Every structure is written in structure tokens, then in C-alpha cells.
């Protein structure tokens, strides 16, 4: 397989969704730009990728602080999600990760741990025909502290009944890798070098 895993005995796989299972980051960025433009906000593309894994409402709050704005958090979050959902027919999976999902499904349990809200995650997984492969979904509304805090991963491990040291995390962001490490889990980085203006796609690091 193209994505090499660390050595160890793993009893569960925990996956980030956006940029890890789904090649959705360029679509999310387009949705952000369109929604923010309605409120006079902006979102630098490099910052968008650096903040990968940060919950949507935290992103809006931080952009408000940085830009001296008072954009309505809930309304803007809903608007951004509506623009993302409109693009779901374009969504593709990331082949290097899908290989491992197909190879191990039915052998060990899977969970998704995402900084996106449940409706977004369900929409992405449904579009990719993968929703039924996951035993647990842990989304932004399920935990108080987002990545790099370990809360989401620890909650998923608890729901699956698997000790953290026997969970392997698949992530595409530094914040996600930090969260996995803080949870006492090994991880594999799915590289995400592609930018919105270059099209979609992702490359898995060996």
C-alpha cells in the first residue's frame, strides 16, 4: 500500500475526515471564501490549511478577533456549511487512505474524529458511500476542546472500548497529529500539499 503505517498492534483506526478520508479541503476553502465575502471577512489560504482541524465556530471567532469584525458565528457557520454541501457531488476520496479502510473494514472498528460538525461529516461520508463503515462519529459538537487537545480522540477510543495505545490515528494536519500524540496514540500523516487554486488531490507521505 502507498501509505506506510507505524509498527504496532492496533485494535482500532481513528480517522480525521476532511483532508484525510475526503479530499474536501479545497471545497471547504471555496465555501469559506464565498460565505465570508457576504460578511466582509477574508481567510488567507495558508492560514486555512494551518488551521486544519480547528472547529468551524472557533475559526469564525478567531477571524473576528484578527480582523476586527463581528460576524455572526452561527449564521456564518450555517451559510458556509450550505455552500460546502452544495459541492458534495464533486467530492472525491483520498485513495491512499481508502485502501486501508477497505483492507481493515470488518476486522477492527473505525471511528471518525473531526473538527467539523456532524452534518458536514455525515454529508461527506454519505457522498463517498463510506458512512456505514464507521462505528463511531465524534464531531465538533461532541467535545469541548478541539485539536490539538486530545479530547476527541480519547472520546472515540472510549466509545469503541479500545485503549488509546492500541488506536492508530490517520490525520492530515499538525493540529491533528498533536492531538493524537497528546492522547497517547500513534499516528500516520496524510500529506495535504495541494492548494485550492491548483485543483484537488492529496499525496500520502511514505
Image (cartoon, rainbow, N blue to C red):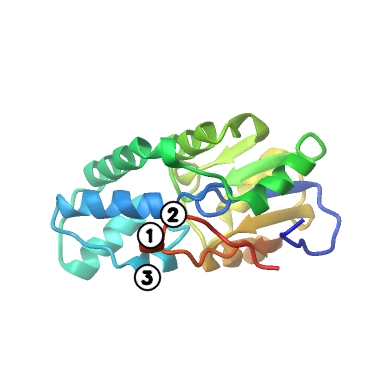
Q: Residue furthest top?
A: 132
First of labels 3, 1 by sequence position = 3
Expressed as whole percent of the image width and height from the top left, the position of residue 57 reads 33, 51
How packed mark 3 is, by other alpha carbons closer than 10 Å (few <14, some 14-19, many 20 or more), is few
The residue singled out by tag 2 in the image is 25
Q: Residue at x 35, y 62 (%)?
A: 197
Q: Quadrant of residue 179?
A: bottom right
Task: Give the numbered dot on residue 196.
Answer: 1
Q: Residue at x 54, y 61 (%)?
A: 149
Q: Is residue 61 above or below residue 101?
A: below
The residue singled out by tag 3 in the image is 46
Indicate left or right for 168 with 52 as reference: right
Quadrant, the C terminus: bottom right
Calculate the distance from the C-alpha at mark 2 to the C-alpha at mark 3.
Answer: 12 Å
Tags 2 and 3 touching, CB below 8 Å? no
* Numbered disc total: 3
Indicate left or right for 111 with 28 as reference: right
Badge 1 marks a residue whose secondary structure is helix
Q: Quadrant of residue 102?
A: top right
Q: Is residue 192 above or below residue 116?
A: below
Tags 1 and 2 touching, CB below 8 Å? yes
Q: Residue at x 63, y 36 (%)?
A: 136
Q: Is residue 110 visible?
A: yes
Expressed as whole percent of the image width and height from the top left, the position of residue 98 reads 66, 46
Front position among marks 1 and 2: 1
Calculate the distance from the C-alpha at mark 1 to the C-alpha at mark 2.
Answer: 8 Å
Indicate left or right for 188 with 113 as reference: right
Expressed as whole percent of the image width and height from the top left, the position of residue 105 reads 75, 37
Badge 3 marks a residue whose secondary structure is helix
First of labels 2, 3 by sequence position = 2
Amino acid at each position: 500500500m502507498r501509505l506506510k503505517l507505524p509498527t504496532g498492534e492496533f485494535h482500532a483506526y481513528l480517522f480525521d475526515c476532511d483532508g484525510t478520508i475526503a479530499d474536501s479541503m479545497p471545497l471547504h476553502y471555496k465555501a469559506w471564501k464565498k460565505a465570508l465575502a457576504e460578511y466582509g471577512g477574508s481567510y488567507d489560504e495558508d492560514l486555512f490549511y494551518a488551521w486544519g482541524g480547528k472547529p468551524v465556530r472557533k475559526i469564525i471567532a478567531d477571524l473576528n478577533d484578527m480582523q476586527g469584525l463581528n460576524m455572526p458565528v452561527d449564521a456564518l457557520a450555517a451559510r458556509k456549511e450550505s455552500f460546502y454541501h452544495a459541492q458534495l457531488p464533486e467530492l472525491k476520496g483520498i485513495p491512499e487512505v481508502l485502501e486501508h479502510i477497505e483492507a481493515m473494514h470488518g476486522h477492527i472498528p473505525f471511528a471518525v474524529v473531526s473538527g467539523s460538525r456532524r452534518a458536514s461529516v455525515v454529508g461527506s461520508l454519505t457522498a463517498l458511500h463510506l458512512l456505514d463503515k464507521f462505528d463511531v462519529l465524534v464531531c465538533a459538537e461532541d467535545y469541548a476542546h478541539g485539536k490539538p487537545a486530545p479530547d476527541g480522540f480519547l472520546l472515540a477510543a472510549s466509545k469503541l472500548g479500545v485503549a488509546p495505545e492500541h488506536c492508530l490515528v490517520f490525520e492530515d494536519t499538525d493540529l491533528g497529529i498533536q492531538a493524537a500524540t497528546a492522547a497517547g496514540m500513534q499516528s500516520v500523516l496524510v500529506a495535504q500539499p495541494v492548494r485550492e487554486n491548483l485543483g484537488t488531490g492529496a499525496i500520502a507521505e511514505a
